[in-house]
């Protein structure tokens, strides 16, 4: 029989044994596990990745596509749901947080502005969310609705309401797990604030992350066991916060594209910053233990949600729940196909299509976008469908239109690495198949963020921004062209009709002595006596370039009052001329064929007996582009004044010499035309010399000299001098 003390000792040993069995092995060291996601960007369903582009090994879920390339299915909310659930079964002291950018214009998320993303995170059991940059992309009021729909804590410490100067959301939340108090603080730099819908900047003010976190972490130090910052800032800012504040751990989002590959780093003091590559491809994990009340970080890793770990069979239940939710939203929001392609297109072709489309929508000469304009680290199958266009556009920026000179455009294009950019309208240092001219003004279409961060481009000229952001512009274009079938390169090689408007106001001095009983037609078109005119002219120009062809229509309208000597104003002259020109290059940059049709009119009012002109000119021939802006055209010309019976049809050779050159701050333009009719003993010279001082691209001061004769008798010459201003605007800046 056991003695009483021995019996008690035996009972204590048995009780201790069962207590040890009941206590989890991890509670002594790894007390807490923190799971985190970032930059899911509206991705809900799995991503299909070419195995050649993926850094993980092949697995049993691989397929072979039509090109015999191995593909891998990874990510998706079903896998996130499954992973988080399994981790919580292994360790009940698990917390799950998101550092933002959960809302983005992916097909399903875009249709309901992120409602489905919030509902999925509710289902998955998210604990804390700190909104990121792109969560604001549908506006402040819309984001407030998403916050109200969340069953989890939503925090932000550095976003303040302008009306009250108080934080928009609670700056932090404290969660107790396994007898440990963990404080979560939220912060985002929101560096794209001015690019979001107007109600964002109207309602909130963003303060320095370092300033707010320093103060809050100091207040929390000693009151909690761990301070975790959920942050969407740059690596430099995260490192500075860890080094200068009482924050112990940062679980963050991707602020800059180049930082996406850096999953985590440690400071010298042992503090940690951790992110994932986003897109639902992985879940970050940091396990925390304490030694003498000092937190230690273990098992820091990025758990890739690939097929080999989470097969479809293993996540069958979670997949069914996600698909049920997707179906619910599909029934609530129409998912009709908004566009079709003549064939499935590749990722690279899709980029070209979107950039070409932006060039088309904005009527710009060329478009250039960085590849980071498209969704970060997107993993898609090789062939995509029309709705997948949404997966490439993720920035809610407006389109920036910048006018620069040809000489600057060359330097700008030379400075860009083509492997990092997508172009439309420019190839081999040519715009729309034509050599870039130094003095020509070109309009570049790009996104607002690129313009604001590219020093070269920003220093060259002011930008005009579209009224809508790029996502909405593309979406609206597709909606307007619903059921239309597109070719992926439809907007790549063809250019657009361009409209230009010119208006000049100037006095004009005329000098010519014409006999009263004159028989001159062209001289009276240029001038009918020594006089002064004042007024202005309007030019409308419609132009299109495609491949090696150029087509241009120009309408000139001139309205002037005229006065001679001391006489009062006696006539008003209306001049209207229409030119239609077609040109095709035979040898690019040098030789071309051309044809021109001109109809020029002159009506002198109010005297009905004065000369009237309706001059028809048809010219065709060969032209040469030479260095220093010199152009020569030789051809045959046909002329007829249809309103003057005294002048029959005229046929003969013509030659034109043009030159455009910069002289210091001035632009010199000289044009001389010589026409010699076959059947008449005369020749006609038409000379114009224009010297222009550009004040801005759209405002110029000019001096113009014109000389004109009608026959071999140089007694009768028409000359004019103009000094005036010119205002111009083209349709690339009109919306």
Image: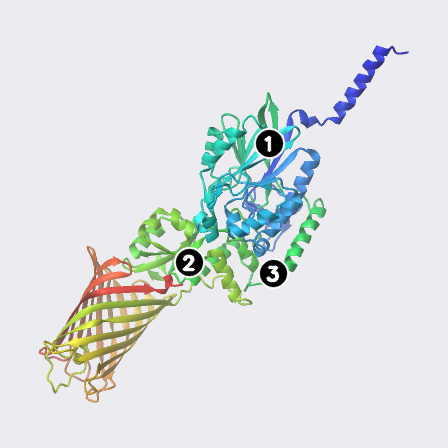
Residue annotated with mark 3: 335
Q: In the shown orientation, is residue 321 left or right of residue 591?
A: right
Q: Is residue 355 above or below residue 636?
A: above
Residue 152 spot, x, y in % from top left = 62, 42
Classify mark 2: helix, strand or loop. Answer: strand
Classify mark 3: helix, strand or loop. Answer: loop
Residue 283 spot, x, y in % from top left = 60, 40
Q: How is the image coloured?
A: rainbow
| Quadrant where the image shows the C terminus | bottom left
Residue 542 spot, x, y in % from top left = 35, 70
Q: In the shown orientation, is residue 294 left or right of residue 646?
A: right
How would you rate the neighbour count of disc 2 (Cα within 10 Å): few for under 14, some for 14-19, many for 20 or more?
some
Query: Closer to the camera, 240 or 40?
Result: 240
Q: Residue furthest left?
A: 715
At horizontal 44% and vertical 38% (from top left) the residue drawn is 208
How would you rate the neighbour count of disc 1 (Cα within 10 Å): few for under 14, some for 14-19, many for 20 or more?
some
Residue annotated with mark 2: 466
Q: In the shown orientation, is residue 103 left or right of residue 405?
A: right
Q: Quadrant of residue 513?
A: bottom left
Classify mark 1: helix, strand or loop. Answer: strand
In front: mark 2 or mark 3?
2
């Amino acid at each position: 029989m056991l003695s009483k003390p021995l019996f008690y000792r035996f009972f204590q040993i048995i009780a201790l044994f069962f207590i040890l069995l009941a206590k989890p092995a991890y509670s002594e060291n790894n007390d807490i596990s923190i799971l985190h996601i970032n930059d899911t960007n509206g991705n809900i369903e799995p991503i299909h990745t070419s195995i050649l582009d993926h850094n993980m090994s092949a697995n049993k879920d691989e397929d072979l596509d039509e090109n015999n390339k191995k593909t891998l299915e990874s990510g998706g909310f079903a896998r996130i749901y499954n992973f988080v659930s399994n981790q919580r079964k292994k360790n009940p002291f698990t917390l799950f947080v998101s550092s933002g950018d959960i809302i983005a214009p992916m097909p399903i998320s875009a249709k309901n502005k992120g409602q489905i993303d919030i509902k999925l995170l509710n289902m998955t059991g998210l604990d804390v969310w700190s909104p990121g940059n792109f969560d604001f992309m549908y506006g402040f009021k819309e984001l407030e609705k998403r916050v109200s729909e969340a069953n989890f804590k939503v925090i932000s410490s550095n976003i303040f309401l302008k009306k009250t100067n108080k934080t928009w959301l609670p700056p932090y939340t404290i969660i107790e797990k396994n007898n440990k108090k963990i404080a979560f603080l939220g912060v985002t730099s929101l560096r794209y604030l001015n690019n979001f819908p107007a109600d964002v900047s109207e309602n909130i003010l963003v303060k320095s992350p370092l300033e707010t976190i320093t103060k809050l972490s100091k207040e929390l130090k000693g009151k909690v066991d761990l301070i975790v910052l959920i942050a969407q800032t740059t690596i430099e800012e995260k490192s500075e916060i860890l080094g200068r504040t009482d924050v112990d751990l940062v679980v963050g989002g991707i602020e800059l594209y180049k930082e996406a590959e850096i999953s985590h780093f440690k400071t010298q003091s042992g503090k940690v910053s951790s992110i994932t590559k986003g897109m639902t491809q992985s879940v970050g994990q940091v396990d925390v233990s304490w030694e003498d009340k000092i937190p230690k970080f273990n098992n820091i890793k990025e758990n890739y949600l690939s097929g080999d770990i989470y097969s479809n069979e293993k996540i069958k239940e979670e997949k069914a729940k996600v698909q049920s939710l997707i179906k619910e939203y599909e029934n609530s929001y129409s998912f009709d196909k908004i566009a079709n392609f003549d064939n499935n297109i590749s990722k690279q072709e899709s980029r070209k299509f979107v950039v070409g489309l932006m060039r088309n929508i904005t009527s710009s000469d060329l478009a250039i976008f960085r590849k980071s304009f498209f969704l970060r680290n997107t993993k898609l199958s090789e062939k995509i469908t029309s709705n997948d266009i949404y997966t490439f556009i993720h920035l809610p920026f407006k389109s920036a239109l910048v006018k620069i000179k040809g000489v600057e455009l060359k330097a700008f294009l030379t400075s860009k690495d083509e492997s990092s950019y997508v172009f439309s309208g420019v190839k081999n240092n040519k715009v729309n198949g034509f050599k870039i001219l130094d003095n020509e003004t070109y309009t570049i279409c790009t996104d607002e963020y690129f313009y604001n961060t590219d020093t070269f481009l920003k220093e060259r000229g002011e930008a005009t921004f579209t009224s809508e952001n790029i996502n909405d512009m593309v979406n609206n274009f597709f909606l307007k062209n619903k059921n239309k079938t597109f070719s992926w390169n439809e907007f790549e090689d063809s250019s657009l009709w361009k409209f230009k408007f010119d208006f000049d106001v100037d006095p004009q001095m005329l000098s010519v002595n014409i006999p009263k009983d004159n028989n001159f037609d062209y001289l009276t078109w240029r001038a009918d006596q020594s006089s002064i005119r004042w007024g202005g002219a309007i030019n409308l120009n419609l132009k299109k370039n495609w491949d090696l062809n150029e087509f241009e229509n120009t309408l000139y309208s001139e309205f002037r009052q005229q006065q001679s000597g001391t006489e009062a104003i006696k006539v008003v002259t209306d001049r209207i001329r229409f030119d239609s020109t077609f040109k095709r290059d035979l040898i690019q940059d040098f030789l071309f064929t051309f044809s021109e049709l001109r109809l020029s009119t002159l009506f002198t009012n109010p005297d009905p007996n004065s000369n009237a002109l309706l001059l028809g000119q048809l010219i065709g021939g060969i032209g040469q582009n030479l260095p220093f802006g010199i152009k020569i055209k030789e051809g045959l010309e046909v002329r007829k004044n249809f309103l003057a019976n005294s002048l029959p049809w005229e046929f003969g050779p013509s030659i034109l010499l043009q030159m455009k050159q910069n002289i210091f701050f001035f632009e010199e333009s000289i044009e001389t035309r010589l026409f010699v009719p076959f059947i008449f003993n005369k020749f006609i010279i038409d000379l114009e010399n224009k010297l222009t001082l550009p004040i801005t691209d759209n405002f110029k001061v000019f001096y113009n000299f014109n000389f004109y004769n009608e026959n071999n008798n140089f007694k009768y010459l028409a000359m004019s001098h103009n000094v005036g201003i010119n205002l111009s605007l083209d349709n690339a800046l009109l919306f």
